[in-house]
Amino acid sequence: MKTIRQRDRIVSEIKCLDKGYVRLLNIASPNPKAVGCSEVAAAARVSYGNFEAERTQEQDYKLCEYLMKNKHTSPFEMVVVWLELKLPIFVARQFVRHRTQSLSEISARYVQLSPDWYIPDVVGGKPTGGSKQGQSDTLDRALQEKYRVYLNSDCQNSYDNYEYFIKKGVAPEHARLFLHVNHYTQWVSKMDLHNMMHFLNLRLDAHAQVEAQVYAKAIYDLLSEYIPDLMEIFDKYRRGETHES
């Protein structure tokens, strides 16, 4: 993990897969100078007309525990997270299902995408035990290497065709049809903390697709660095809950 400066703001970045990343752009709350349990607790106290009341850190933490444990979610929605992600399209489509996430994605209607596509280090075999999703560690290395070579060759040929027809005057929105679902896209997203925790609970689960888990873990690690108290409460009371995906 590294911290980089971009457009006069500090962002923290974690690399994901072969060419992707997650960047934490900002975390905000009603208090422009702070974010954490104290701000969630303050938002909860609005119900009693005590938004400005001061409490100890321990009191704020205990109140957040109570809120999380008893599923009082509105105060956690007062904290908002902005992320920038570069991720394969097939992973991105698993993430857009989360209903209250706002997205601004790079548009292949307007710009030519970079020649970036994902080739997995480990190629999964068909799932075992009658499952219809997931993968198993059943493929020998020779077959995995053959898969990677064939996939990379197909992606390169497809990108060459994509680039060729753009140069010949085909509209980018049609030329992009050559590209594969493992091509990388980029977006900036905004999500409140309650829904972010719901998302993380689903995508950190061992049953989630491997690549989705990689991005969820990167987001979790970044948030744990900047709002450790709230993520600790997430680990205690939210992580591992059973929800429909």
Image (tube, rainbow, N blue to C red):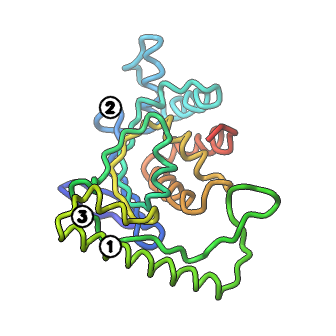
Residue at 45% x, 73% y is 18
Q: What percent of the width, then of the height, locates residue 239?
A: 64, 44
Residue 219: percent from left, percent from top: 47, 54
x%, y% of residue 156?
38, 78
Distance CA(mark 2)–CA(mark 1): 42 Å
Check disc 2 and report the residue beneath it: 31
From the viewer's perspective, tell me whether residue 163 is left or right of residue 28: left
Q: Earlier in the sequence, mark 2 or mark 1?
A: 2
Residue 181: quadrant of the picture: bottom left
Query: Is residue 63 depicted above or below 151 in this figure?
Result: above
Quadrant of the rendering where the C terminus is positioned: top right
Depth check, front residue: 222 or 201? 201
What amino acid does circle 1 point to? Pro
Most extreme residue toward the right, as rendered?
129
Q: Nearer the viewer, residue 171 or 229?
A: 171
Q: Residue at x 33, y 29 (%)?
A: 30
Task: Give the image location of residue 5, x and y in percent.
Answer: 24, 61
- For marks 2 and 3, give the one nearer the viewer: 3
Residue ID for mark 1: 115
The answer to which of marks 2 and 3 sits earlier in the sequence is: 2
Callout 2: SS? loop
Label 3 packing within 10 angstroms: few (<14), some (14-19), many (20+): some
Query: For the point 34% across and 52% down, which residue is it?
Result: 187
Side (left or right) of 106 relative to 244: left
Name above or below for residue 239 compared with residue 157: above
Q: CA distance from mark 2 to mark 3?
A: 40 Å
Q: Which residue is mark 3?
A: 112
Give the residue type at disc 3. Gln
Q: Amino acid at mark 2?
A: Asn
Q: Residue drawn at (28%, 57%), measured in percent from left and top?
A: 108
Marks 1/3: CA–CA distance: 9 Å
Give the side of residue 29 with respect to residue 141, left or right: left
